[in-house]
């Protein structure tokens, strides 16, 4: 039976929490760091789940009870490769974004905003009604500012 140390379980939990928090950021470098932290958390979780070290998994040389399970080690190696591939992809994506725009912030997609505005309910909500009663809301004016900034090639600020 495998028992997991509470400190190690909390460490894995903190690594996953920090990794997911960083994945939700708009900066590609923070997303990259989040992927790396999640990769380390996954490797640690797999090594903890593998149990204590044992003998080499060669059948017939040692009793079956003292053999180490090779599956967690194989999964950890796979997790390392996947994390490396995602890291190199996100580094290239961040570098390309920095070269094209001068920063690595992910901007809102103007086309997505236009489509979501088309699918909006036809009845105006109380907060969306302007003083002149036209039914256009603050969200639509903000969308227009974002579209105008995108047309000029600038940011949404």
Image (cartoon, rainbow, N blue to C red):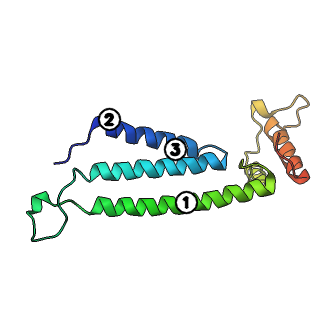
For the residues labelled 2 and 1, say whether their Cβ atoms are less than 8 Å apart: no
Mark 1 and mark 3 lie on one chain; the one further toward the N terminus is 3
Mark 2 and mark 1 lie on one chain; the one further toward the N terminus is 2
Judged from this view, the residue extending furthest toward the top is 131
The relative height of residue 15 versus residue 36 in the rendered view (above or below) is: above
Q: Residue at x 78, y 57 (%)?
A: 99
Point out which mark residue 20 bears. 3
Cα distance in 3D space between marks 2 and 3: 20 Å
**Left or right of 44, for residue 133:** right
Percent of width and height locating residue 104: 72, 49
Residue corresponding to mark 2 = 7
For the residues labelled 2 and 3, say whether their Cβ atoms are less than 8 Å apart: no
Point out which mark residue 86 bears. 1
Q: Residue at x 38, y 38 (%)?
A: 11
Percent of width and height locating residue 50: 26, 54
Tell me which corner region of the image, top left, top right, bottom left or bottom right, holds residue 61. Answer: bottom left
Q: Secondary structure at mark 2?
A: helix
In terms of depth relative to the viewer, which is nearer, 111 or 14?
Answer: 14
The relative height of residue 122 versus residue 92 in the rendered view (above or below) is: above
Point out which mark residue 17 bears. none
Percent of width and height locating residue 69: 22, 60
Cα distance in 3D space between marks 1 and 3: 15 Å
For the residues labelled 1 and 3, say whether their Cβ atoms are less than 8 Å apart: no
Percent of width and height locating residue 20: 52, 44
The relative height of residue 42 versus residue 127 in the rendered view (above or below) is: below
Cα distance in 3D space between marks 2 and 1: 28 Å
Q: Secondary structure at mark 1?
A: helix
In terms of depth relative to the viewer, which is nearer, 110 or 81?
Answer: 81
In terms of depth relative to the viewer, which is nearer, 142 or 91?
Answer: 91
Tag 2: Cα neighbours inside 10 Å, few (<14), some, or many (≥20)?
Answer: few
**Left or right of 150, for residue 45:** left
Mark 2 and mark 3 lie on one chain; the one further toward the N terminus is 2
């Amino acid at each position: 039976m495998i028992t997991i140390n509470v400190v190690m379980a909390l460490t894995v939990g903190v690594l996953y929490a920090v990794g997911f928090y960083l994945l939700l950021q708009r900066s590609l470098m923070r997303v990259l760091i989040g992927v790396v932290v999640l990769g380390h958390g996954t490797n640690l979780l797999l090594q903890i789940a593998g149990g204590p070290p044992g003998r080499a998994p060669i059948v017939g040389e040692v009793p079956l009870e003292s053999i180490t399970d090779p599956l967690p080690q194989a999964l950890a190696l796979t997790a390392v490769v996947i994390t490396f591939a995602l890291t190199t992809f996100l580094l290239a994506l961040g570098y390309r974004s920095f070269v094209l725009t001068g920063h690595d912030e992910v901007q809102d997609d103007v086309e997505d905003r236009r489509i979501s505005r088309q699918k909006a309910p036809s009845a105006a909500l109380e907060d969306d009604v302007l003083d002149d009663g036209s039914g256009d809301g603050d969200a639509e004016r903000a969308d227009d500012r974002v579209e105008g900034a995108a047309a000029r090639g600038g940011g949404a600020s």
